[in-house]
Image: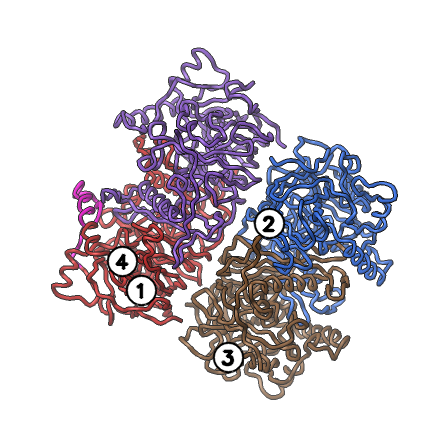
Chain colours: A brown, B blue, C purple, D red
Amino acid sequence: MPEVVFRVDQSKSMRDQDVPGHNRWHPDIPAAVTVRPGSEVRIESREWMDGQVVNDDSANDIRDLNLNVNHMLSGPIAVEGAEPGDLIIVDILDIGPVPQETGPIAGQGWGYTGIFARGNGGGFLTDWYPDACKAIWDFHGQMATSRHIPGVRFTGITHPGLFGTAPSADMLARWNRREQALIDTAPDKVPPLALPPQPAEVLAGTLTGSDLERIGREGARTVPPRENGGNQDIKNFSRGARVFMPVYVPGGLLSTGDLHFSQGDGEITFCGAIEMGGFIDVHLDLIKGGMEKYGVSTNPVFMPGNVEPRYDEFISFIGISVDHETDTNHYLDATLAYRNAVLNGIEYLKKFGYTGEQAYLLLCAAPIEGRLSSVVDIPNACCSLYLPTAIFDFDVRPTADGPVRVDRGQCATAD
Amino acid sequence: MPEVVFRVDQSKSMRDQDVPGHNRWHPDIPAAVTVRPGSEVRIESREWMDGQVVNDDSANDIRDLNLNVNHMLSGPIAVEGAEPGDLIIVDILDIGPVPQETGPIAGQGWGYTGIFARGNGGGFLTDWYPDACKAIWDFHGQMATSRHIPGVRFTGITHPGLFGTAPSADMLARWNRREQALIDTAPDKVPPLALPPQPAEVLAGTLTGSDLERIGREGARTVPPRENGGNQDIKNFSRGARVFMPVYVPGGLLSTGDLHFSQGDGEITFCGAIEMGGFIDVHLDLIKGGMEKYGVSTNPVFMPGNVEPRYDEFISFIGISVDHETDTNHYLDATLAYRNAVLNGIEYLKKFGYTGEQAYLLLCAAPIEGRLSSVVDIPNACCSLYLPTAIFDFDVRPTADGPVRVDRGQCATAD
Amino acid sequence: MPEVVFRVDQSKSMRDQDVPGHNRWHPDIPAAVTVRPGSEVRIESREWMDGQVVNDDSANDIRDLNLNVNHMLSGPIAVEGAEPGDLIIVDILDIGPVPQETGPIAGQGWGYTGIFARGNGGGFLTDWYPDACKAIWDFHGQMATSRHIPGVRFTGITHPGLFGTAPSADMLARWNRREQALIDTAPDKVPPLALPPQPAEVLAGTLTGSDLERIGREGARTVPPRENGGNQDIKNFSRGARVFMPVYVPGGLLSTGDLHFSQGDGEITFCGAIEMGGFIDVHLDLIKGGMEKYGVSTNPVFMPGNVEPRYDEFISFIGISVDHETDTNHYLDATLAYRNAVLNGIEYLKKFGYTGEQAYLLLCAAPIEGRLSSVVDIPNACCSLYLPTAIFDFDVRPTADGPVRVDRGQCATAD
Amino acid sequence: MPEVVFRVDQSKSMRDQDVPGHNRWHPDIPAAVTVRPGSEVRIESREWMDGQVVNDDSANDIRDLNLNVNHMLSGPIAVEGAEPGDLIIVDILDIGPVPQETGPIAGQGWGYTGIFARGNGGGFLTDWYPDACKAIWDFHGQMATSRHIPGVRFTGITHPGLFGTAPSADMLARWNRREQALIDTAPDKVPPLALPPQPAEVLAGTLTGSDLERIGREGARTVPPRENGGNQDIKNFSRGARVFMPVYVPGGLLSTGDLHFSQGDGEITFCGAIEMGGFIDVHLDLIKGGMEKYGVSTNPVFMPGNVEPRYDEFISFIGISVDHETDTNHYLDATLAYRNAVLNGIEYLKKFGYTGEQAYLLLCAAPIEGRLSSVVDIPNACCSLYLPTAIFDFDVRPTADGPVRVDRGQCATAD
């Protein structure tokens, strides 16, 4: 087992750890530890909401989540000798849930997937599914099942939803400027277009007082992926992946968190992965001057893991960039096209007895693939969603006889 | 070999065939043939531009293409007993290029990939690459190589770019209405937002005179994918796929064409696949009332083929929905995110000696995967592009030593 | 399409072709054609029995086969500049059945799998299944089905069963000596231990008279795989494979034939693949001195094709080197272990309604994998057979309810 | 984490555990624990030699191993309600090494592969490599590397080498009878043909005195796979596998051990896997009367795991059943054919600078596939060995230039 360089006591909040992590991006958050290139290290992680969600059959906790808390990150970890312009090579050696036997924290043998209420976060289909919902998933080694979504069982492609380096001060200023400009186009939108810096609930390692206040005023929220990686939610950042992280500040200042037991492409409910606390083991190394050498200017580059489950059969749903409710065309809008593919998938699954909410939660958490099939055939983008048939314990393929519809209950809902 | 139900003499234009095909969508284009459910049939196909592109080292032909011609489709094929609301089950049994030994037509041992000029079609990166370019690909059994893009060799995931059923008259009217509404928002844009009906070059099977003129006035252009399938450009509609096509008119009236030897997800130059003429063998059957049975209201459903090449290693590029040139945020815009992932991939490949145009053409034609990694992390969508490393005859992975850059020439350009 | 360097008129016997092939190994069979390194060529092929088996529902033809005829090979093909000690690089570009529409010859839309009678060839389970049987397979693009084995449908991993270079005179003499020595240990065994040279039915290209007679007396039979490759029946010599063939005589003198639409590991009935005529396209090149460079002294080396069907689920059967009928242990005998694994698989399939003969024929023709799991755990070798579940149109997995047994008819049998 | 039903203190011998395991097969070894169908349980395991091998650079420990000790098994575990004729369904949920940080026991971050000396165990190539050798492997999450075999790095397909149920008294008597009959054919052979019961070092759970003595006299050695499963060394008994174990005594009495971090098909040195201690998590259930329902009479049936690493490129070696040193043919001897394939692979790897011993150890431990390609082409069986190219950090494919040979040191050897 590699040396634990960031340790978490899962019985406590991230705030109360010996060395706390952070929940904003800022270059002045001090490194929790410094490691040498060539090191293999373990980083322990809280689940992204720092333990607000419990293993029960009500979605009240999802409804009432304090969204200023997230994401509770482990780090920053400085890599000795890393300088702006370098690439940090991160080999993801292992990822796993919290090893304790049982307990109240997501990651201790279970995780959760949620649909956020429209007024508290929202999500990809918030116009169709505006209310808070939840599904609890039980872990069986690498497999997950859910009492809230019966009839499925699948292997987790476990990965960190969030992996990033610290922005430079200049980069941070640009982020804040450009995101505020977007917010300003529709400041009252619910859910909002973007999230500005938020002093409430800010955590910045060991910083306190005016230093912490400044991080609260300036620090970028961790929700969006950006030039530093961040909350990319790429499900293939899994075991065996090799990631090349751009360095913007001395030491690079890596942070990670938001571990997912499983997630489909798109993480389509916002809280769509199976969220958990746990650990991640990585090997760290450097390519000096790697950004210039490989033309990396804006985002990490990576090589995905090679131990993802194999599937040989999929049922695939297609969407195009038409708003079918109003019969309106949008120009090459892949987001809309994927939304339609997802809606088509949900309608399909409802014919087998799932509720829309169950189907929506399932497409978030299961290892679906979301593809940009065509983005040039004006005016309609075309996206497709690949659902592996092997995750179902019934035959989910279309046949001349039609689907066998059975009552599959309902996920956890809010009062 | 299945019975040939739509025959093409590849030495002639689609217009001059004994039974011509069509290049517009309209319910009144008469069926070229009627087949029974349970039939296995072969459909021969012209390449999408009806032979305007030649096997040479100049992109003048691409620059001067008549875009009113496309797509030259084979069909319509009526399925006996198919009625609105049914699903036609299409098993794709085989696809191949034109079997003649050598000749001037794309498909006879070679195909092409093009970048359209901004003023004549444009494409995904027309702001970066506004000039016409071309790459010729030679077929070696299932493998393709190109003298215009040395250093790569890959197996074709051969598929029809276009596969559709006829719209009903009402559906067609809706298409025309909604697409004109989009055009009207920016009628002078170059390239245009969408293509309205176009009488020039219209072909509608055996129709002539005022019937043909009406098709010209009313018939929907074949470029976008729509509720009838159409030009979806899904690379996984390959051998072994099973497709469930919605039926909107009696007989269903299937048409196909735009055969691709290979294509990456997104078909990112508009003419981005390796275009060819050839044949497609299908088995046809029916699910009566299948649209209601399976909740299919807007698009086909399909199960992809299981004989696609296996790859175990990818180099992956990430993009987010930020316009990096102006540092402007766009709200969950997956199209922009994918564009950035593509641009990142091009910059990477340039470090190995490819020109931008070569890299762009390569990412169109090679079996890359385009994924919607995250579409909920406001405000930034995150897309990723997976490039299989095995298609290169050099080591394309990042190393501490940096890339080995060699002169790789240039693709075909226009005068 | 590559140049056809060995042409076959499938309406005629191999003997009656303009340039006949051959059915014995001998260095003095003259090259049918000489090709240059770097060439892409097509080789047409008769099915291995030169057309003795017909598409009907009787196995009389299998029972009465003349086994002196096989294998009817196409070649020899000399590679310019190839000298003993070189390796010929063979890229398998394409393989396909006879392209004519319909006809009496295996390969024209159909193929066959047979169980040889014990007195005329025998096979792996001849003590259990001593009588001639046959299954006809219909080709649907890349898929095969059989009216004699209902309930299965699978993609062919098409390959040449036989691919070899000519032996040197000295090597040929050694083959004849060592095989005769084996025969002499049990000269009356039925089926025999090995096959000595056989003048009856000999064919040696254009040779006639005393030259042909000498080939008959000296030429090695084509049944076993040997140092020259030959009848290796490796199912992964499929499209996309790259093979490195050792050269023992000037020009190498490549020959091929015995095309298989599909075969399981082991080809367990002797006539176990789906046999067909057709064509194979290859690219040929040389590694001068390659045998010494890579330590190749006794057999070809190869890199398998990458377009084989993907399967994600198998039901696997195990066998150990115990003769269970007599309860006798054999020392690390992998052949016996695999025989037991096959017998266990047959017993399993019989529970679903197949006859033993059907199950045996299925395990020959379907893309099963046969693995040497352990060959060191004295005294019992352990082999395992992996049967992909996706080839069945019913659920073939074990469940608590037990199998659903239905009447599945019978294969073709002899009078 | 499932309940630990068999607990091991890795600082102690299996003999000194609170509840010891066993190292012989006998129906009278009492169950260590009884579990209910439907349970998920963890079983902890000692490495097979109970800690005799250390992490150093000498193979003296391998040379001097006490082979009467193995295999140190965990169990027996009784399944409530299991009766002879049932099948126990075992889902392998997770497998991992010893979780402690560092220590002297194989499994605590490292494992070993050995070549046994001819006079103390021998192995598949003992006539070629008669001396004791060893390679230590370091674990990096799911990856392994070795200082004794530089240039390779691969993902473990972790599995239990041994998984079995208890034989009935009658079955045990038959085993002893038939194995003694084999030994009697060559009682002085070195290494021996089989291993008779051995009182020395016997361990049988809590049994002592005359009970233990009887187990020593009657208990079957654990080396060979038999009708109860046992030491099958099937590398695909990995995470996600579902196994159907035949029940021969009330409760079934499952035992397991001999955990392998990785192993190639064949486990070709006898001590060929990467040996480790650790844990295995399983879910247990029953199919009542399953042996009759599914025709299972002699061996387990299983469905392999679906999370094995994907490889898309292999270099493959072929062997036939000829003794090339004496030029002698053996009749369809797949073991000899595979031995030749292994020898061919070793000769190939030596050209890149490995010693024969290193290459031999590598082919044992790496995820190679061993296939029975043809077992019917009299007189020569044909086997093939598939070596994934991606495990090497250099290009291991044949090229016209020949291999780049570098000094790769040597594995651990004995004095």
* Highlighted magenta segment, given as a residue range: D176-200
Q: Quadrant of the C terminus of chain C?
A: top left
Return the chain for callout 3: A
* Disc 3 packing (10 Å; few <14; some 14–19; many ≥20): some
Q: Name the outermost residue toward the front.
A: B81
Rounded to the nearest whole Å, what is the CA distance between mark 4 and mark 2? 45 Å
The residue under label 4 is which amino acid type? Answer: Pro
Q: Secondary structure at mark 2?
A: strand
Residues marked 4 and 1 touching at CB (< 8 Å): no
Q: Is residue D412 visible?
A: no
Depth order, front residue of B374/D107: B374
Decide if residue D172 is on the left or right side of residue B324: left
Residues marked 4 and 2 touching at CB (< 8 Å): no
Decide if residue B61 is on the left or right side of residue A65: right
User: In the image, what residue occupies the spot 77% across and 63% down?
Assistant: A328
Say which of marks 3 and 4 sits in front.
Answer: 4
* Disc 2 packing (10 Å; few <14; some 14–19; many ≥20): many
User: In the image, what residue occupies the spot 71% across and 32% down?
Assistant: B103
Decide if residue B8 is on the left or right side of residue A108: right
From the top left corner, tell me how far across and down residue C302 is, in percent.
47, 39
Rounded to the nearest whole Å, what is the CA distance between mark 4 and mark 1? 26 Å
Give the answer, above or below, for where A88 lies relative to C311. Answer: below
Q: Name the outermost residue toward the top.
A: C209
The residue under label 3 is which amino acid type? Answer: Val
Return the chain for callout 4: D
Query: What's the mark number on residue D45?
Result: 1
Q: Is residue C314 visible?
A: yes
The residue under label 1 is which amino acid type? Answer: Ser
Q: Which residue is mark 4?
A: D84
From the top left corner, tell me how far across and down residue A83 is, in percent.
60, 67
Q: Which residue is mark 2?
A: B242
